[in-house]
Amino acid sequence: MWGDSQDQVTGYLLLQGFSREEAFEIANTLFKERAAAVRANGIRKFFYGFGLMWVPVIAFIIFRSIGYMPLKIMGAAILAGVYGVYLEIMGILMAVAPKSEKGDVADQ
């Protein structure tokens, strides 16, 4: 049910013999739980992204201190930083607007 719309979940519950009020109440509870799970995933992505954004900065400081800049390693560090920015943006969007996320929460 995690990837379904609220109308689909309510319809399924009605087919299973729940009353209209019970079906709406259960569906609302399920979607509040889903929003909380999406927010938690968003906050986790935010912090992972924040950590990864510092990888190129730390690599640059270390390479400057030793006086040698290995380009392939620095390139990999920059890629990690770019992925960190992506995770940061996705984490903010997931935490601020959890209902905009589609699909199953387990796939995130």
Image (tube, rainbow, N blue to C red):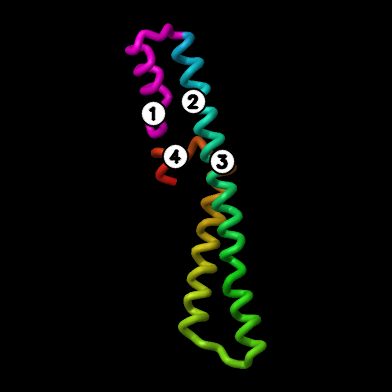
Binning the other alpha carbons within 10 Å of mark 3 as few (below 14), some (14 to 19) or many (20 upward) gives many
Amino acid of disc 1: Met
Query: In the rendering, which numbered label is found on residue 105?
Result: 4
Q: Which residue position is annotated with label 2?
A: 30
Residue at the extreme bottom: 67
- Is-magenta flag for residue 61? no
Q: Which residue position is annotated with label 3?
A: 39
Residue at 52%, 80% in the rendered image:
74
The image quadrant where one finds the N terminus is: top left
Rounded to the nearest angstrom, the CA distance separating label 3 from label 1 is 18 Å
Instruction: Confirm or deny contact between disc 3 and disc 4 (CB under 8 A).
Output: no
Instruction: Confirm or deny contact between disc 1 and disc 2 (CB under 8 A).
Output: yes
Number of numbered discs on residues: 4
Rounded to the nearest angstrom, the CA distance separating label 3 from label 4 is 10 Å
Rounded to the nearest angstrom, the CA distance separating label 4 from label 2 is 12 Å
Instruction: Confirm or deny contact between disc 3 and disc 1 (CB under 8 A).
Output: no
Binning the other alpha carbons within 10 Å of mark 2 as few (below 14), some (14 to 19) or many (20 upward) gives some
Which of marks 2 and 4 precedes in the sequence?
2
- Is-magenta flag for residue 11? yes
Which residues lie in the magenta part? 1-20
Q: Quadrant of residue 57?
A: bottom right
Position of residue 22 relative to residue 107, above or below, is above
Position of residue 58 relative to residue 3, above or below, is below
Binning the other alpha carbons within 10 Å of mark 1 as few (below 14), some (14 to 19) or many (20 upward) gives some
Rounded to the nearest angstrom, the CA distance separating label 1 from label 2 is 9 Å
Residue 107 locus on image (x, y percent): 40, 44
Mark 4 secondary-structure assignment: helix
Which of marks 3 and 2 precedes in the sequence?
2
Rounded to the nearest angstrom, the CA distance separating label 1 from label 4 is 10 Å
